[in-house]
Image (tube, rainbow, N blue to C red):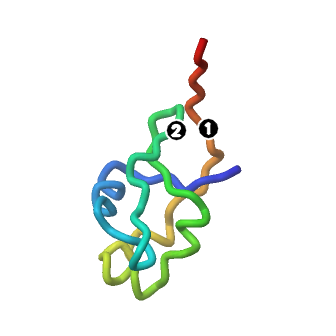
Amino acid sequence: MNVYKLTLEQRNQLIGHTYDGVQFFNTDAIDLEGDYYISVEVYNNLTLVRANELGVINWWFTLPLIPYNPIVSEFI
């Protein structure tokens, strides 16, 4: 499974905003390497118009696709 990597600045720019007018970006998603990310589904649901409204159009379409490396916690 792959996800799109966000920088801290990009993540901060998405906090409190919706990607489709209803659902908020999950800006707390972080992987094992400490990278912030968004899912492919969220990425695909952001329209060109909405990206422009959010002011992210200059970097949105160049986000790197990376392998998802989840944080695994074991409960005993």
Task: Please give the residue where the numbered disc 2 appears in the rendered image.
Answer: 31
Q: Work out whether 16 lies above or below 44.
A: above
Farthest residue to the top: give it.
76
Label 1: element kind: loop
Quarter assignment of residue 16? bottom left
Three-letter residue code for mark 2: Asp
Residue 1, given in percent of the width and then of the height, sits at: 70, 50
The answer to whether residue 9 is above or below residue 48 is above
Which residue type does callout 1 highlight?
A: Asn
- Circles 2 and 1, Cβ within 8 Å, touching? The answer is yes
Judge from the rendering whether residue 30 lies leftward or rightward of residue 53; answer left or right: right
Image point (51%, 33%), residue name = 33
- In the shown orientation, is residue 16 left or right of residue 19? left
Count neighbours of disc 1 (C-alpha within 10 A) and say few if under 14, some if 14 to 19, many if 20 or more.
some
Q: Identify the residue shown where x is 54% and y is 68%.
A: 43
Residue 67: give x, y in percent of width and height.
Answer: 65, 46
Q: Nearer the viewer, residue 26 or 3?
A: 26
In the rendered image, the vertical position of residue 43 relative to residue 70, given as above or below: below
Where is residue 52, by image quadrant?
bottom left
**N-terminal-most mark, 2 or 1:** 2
Drawn side of residue 4 relative to residue 59, left or right: right
The residue at 43%/69% (across/down) is: 23
What residue is pinned by disc 1? 69
User: For the view shown, which residue lies furthest in the bottom direction?
Assistant: 49
